[in-house]
Image (cartoon, rainbow, N blue to C red):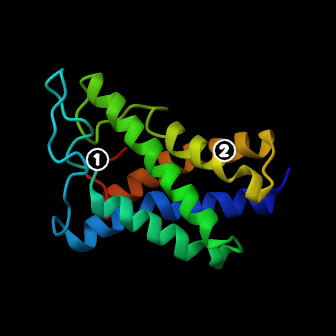
Amino acid sequence: MHFSAIAQALAILTLANTAPLVAKKLLGTRLAHPLDGGLLLFDGRPLFGPSKTIRGILVSIVAATGGAPVVGVAPWVGAMMAVTAMAGDLLSSFLKRRLGRAPSSQALGLDQLPESVLPLLAGSQALSLTGLDIAVAVAAFFIGELMFARLFYSIGWRDEPY
């Protein structure tokens, strides 16, 4: 197992997934334009919902790209992992809307897996992650996300405690 590579990957995932929450806390609704522009699909539900913003995507990519060298990873790896983390988050939101779930509602597994598995697979070669490394990192991200969600809720970074 490559513990340092797992730690690097988790640091980038944390930056990519936390930066939009920090931006929301600092900026409120300023520059928070919904990525889907309010588009409703055939089922009458939003494509992604109002909580998925252009600002969130951009802040995620900038934070992970800038933070990657701090943890010893090339900026392009940070950018790639952020893009795929946000793609996973958008996939999760898309599926939750199709299932009739409200924005920011909890869907255990669906909330954590796409935004961790996709970027870990995307960064696996650059970080020399094995299948076991990816499994350990996904498990750590899953547990960490559940633990930190309550903390982020208590300090006002999340709208829901999960």
The quadrant in which residue 73 appears is: bottom right
Which residue is label 2 attached to? 121
Determine whether 5 is above or below 42 in the image.
Answer: below
As helix, strand or loop, the secondary structure at mark 2 comes to helix
Give percent across and percent down for residue 102. Answer: 22, 33
The quadrant in which residue 79 appears is: bottom right
Nearest the eye: 99 or 118: 118
Residue drawn where x is 32% and y is 65% of the image: 155
Which amino acid, by three-letter code, is at mark 2? Leu
Nearest the eye: 74 or 67: 74
Quick check: 88 left or right of 56? right
Residue drawn where x is 46% and y is 55% of the image: 148
Give the Cα distance between marks 2 and 1.
Answer: 29 Å
Quick check: 146 left or right of 58? right
Earlier sequence position, callout 2 versus callout 1: 2
Residue drawn where x is 57% and y is 56% of the image: 81
As helix, strand or loop, the secondary structure at mark 1 comes to loop
Which residue is label 1 attached to? 160
Single out the mark in the foreground, 2 or 1: 2
